[in-house]
Image: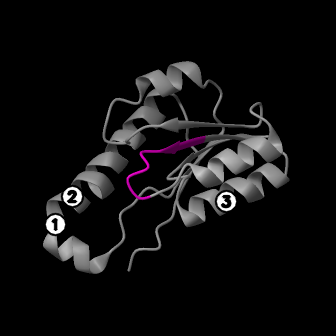
């Protein structure tokens, strides 16, 4: 089975996707900075599927991700759910949205290229 990095795994869609991939026997490396997501669903998944199948990291994709990729080798694919999505808030704080959605995604992609990870799905519920 595949080892899948799920970015934004503490959010609603990210935690559901983690659950579905775990049900199919995949190994999950979950990342979230928990500014909008929650640890509780990931803790529940760890209880149900054991620590060997899911590990989560409190990381922001805008920061250096090298330690993650040094620890988690052989990632097969990435599912990126870590975008901010509120239209109203994005109009009030466009710099936050650019920083997270553009700069953070670019940083993630840079680390994926450095680690020869070529399979990525980007999904956002943002309108």
Q: What is the tally of numbered marks visible in this picture?
A: 3
Q: Is residue 32 magenta?
A: yes
Q: Is residue 61 left or right of residue 121?
A: left
C-beta proximity under 8 Å, tags 1 and 2? yes
Q: Could you say which is closer to the camera, residue 33 or residue 28?
A: 33
Q: Which residue is mark 3?
A: 17
Q: Which residue is mark 2?
A: 96
Tell me which segment is drawn in magenta.
30-36
As drawn, 36 above or below 63: below
Dividing the picture into quarters, in which one does residue 84 lie? bottom left
What secondary structure is found at the residue carrying circle 3?
A: helix
Q: Is residue 22 left or right of residue 32?
A: right
What secondary structure is found at the residue carrying circle 2?
A: helix
Location of residue 126 in the rendering, given as x and y in whole percent from the top left corner: 40, 74
Q: Could you say which is closer to the camera, residue 88 or residue 120?
A: 88
- Could you give the CA–CA distance between mark 1 and mark 2, rounded to whole angstroms? 6 Å
Q: Could you say which is closer to the camera, residue 6 or residue 33?
A: 33
Between discs 2 and 3, the one toward the N terminus: 3
Which residue: 84% across, 52% down? 24
Location of residue 35 in the rendering, given as x and y in whole percent from the top left corner: 38, 53
């Amino acid at each position: 089975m595949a080892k899948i990095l799920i970015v934004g795994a503490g959010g609603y869609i990210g935690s559901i996707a983690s659950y579905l991939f775990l049900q199919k026997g995949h190994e999950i490396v979950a990342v979230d900075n928990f500014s909008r997501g929650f640890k509780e669903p990931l803790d529940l998944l760890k209880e149900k599927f054991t620590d060997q199948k899911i590990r989560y990291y409190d990381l922001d994709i805008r920061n250096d991700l090298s330690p993650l990729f040094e620890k988690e080798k052989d990632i097969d694919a990435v599912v990126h759910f870590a975008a901010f999505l509120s239209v109203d808030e994005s109009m009030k704080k466009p710099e936050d949205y650019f920083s997270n959605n553009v700069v953070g995604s670019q940083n993630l992609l840079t680390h994926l290229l450095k680690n020869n990870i070529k399979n990525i799905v980007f999904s956002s519920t943002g309108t």
